Amino acid sequence: MTTVLAPVAGAAIGLAAVPDPVFSQAMVGPGTAIDPLRQPVEALAPIDGTIVKLHPHAYVVVGDDGRGVLVHLGIDTVQLKGEGFRLLAAEGDRVSAGQPVVAWDPATVEAGGRSPVCPVVALDAVAGSVGEIAEGGVAAGDPLFEWS
Amino acid sequence: MAERTVSVASEVGLHARPAATFVQTAAKVPFDVTIAKAGGSPVSAKSILSVLALDVRQGESIVISAEGEGAEELLDELAQIASAS
């Protein structure tokens, strides 16, 4: 059982509400999404593990059991090419759940015409293995869902 | 063993939409399908984690391999996804 933490504060809205079919149709995997508070924040590691991939706009943390969780900061934010994002960790770093990984401002992303919604996805998760998904307001570091 | 070498054309590389489509397509078949960067170690093409971690950028070449009934058709399909811009 892996408890996945909310990387940012906001409202847990479910993947179906993400304005990108890759996430809303759970093509990447199951999980949920957070509509973040519009304030400068430090996005956190969702689980204990190693940062196997770190982009300014997205990162993947893999736990010792091999399970990977993707955090995507906003939609289509790859197009920003890192502008407005500041890395607080490095690829290959070991992190604890709740440790800051990327500093960014959802309000800036939104002002640029993009959705700041953050999908949090259990990669390669077996169907039905994600549950206890939080709904509504969450603080950064709160339990977001359970991966059994 | 059937094999294709293709250059990834998507501006974002093999991430997000192309990666998800690629993995979903590979996952349809019962046999193993692997993806590697040219000269690199192969990983499962059915794992979104493995494909995202491989971090293939635009213009990089990948080698996709499979062995089984329908492998040629599958690799054609995967090559088309990877080479689509």
Image (cartoon, coloured by chain):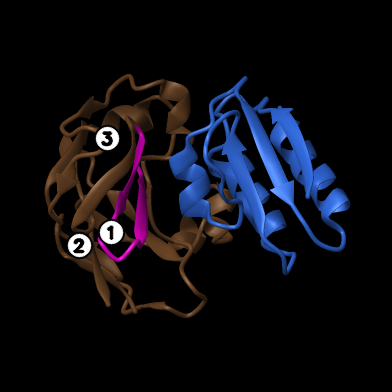
Above/below status of A85 relative to A17 = above
Residue topped by disc 1: A11
Any idea which chain is the brown one in this picture?
A: A
Q: Nearer the viewer, residue A118 or A126?
A: A126
Identify the residue shown where x is 12% and y is 47%: A99
- Majority secondary structure of the magenta segment? strand
Q: Is residue A76 left or right of residue A95?
A: right
Q: Quadrant of the N terminus of chain A?
A: bottom left
Q: Nearer the viewer, residue A80 or A129?
A: A129
Residue topped by disc 3: A91
Residue topped by disc 2: A138
What range is drawn magenta here? Answer: A57-72
Residue type at numbered disc 3: Glu
Above/below status of B60 relative to A104 = above
Q: Is residue B35 left or right of residue A39?
A: right
Q: Gap in Å between the C-alphas at discs 1 and 2?
A: 6 Å
Identify the residue shown where x is 22% and y is 63%: A137
Measured as percent of width and height from the top left, residue B11 is found at 59, 24
Judge the density around disc 2: few (<14), some (14-19), many (≥20) Cα neighbours within 10 Å. Answer: many
Any idea which chain is the blue one in this picture?
A: B
Q: Gap in Å between the C-alphas at discs 1 and 3?
A: 28 Å
Measured as percent of width and height from the top left, residue A22 is found at 57, 51
Q: Which quarter of the picture shows residue A58?
A: top left
**Subunit under mark 1:** A
Same chain, labels 1 and 3: yes
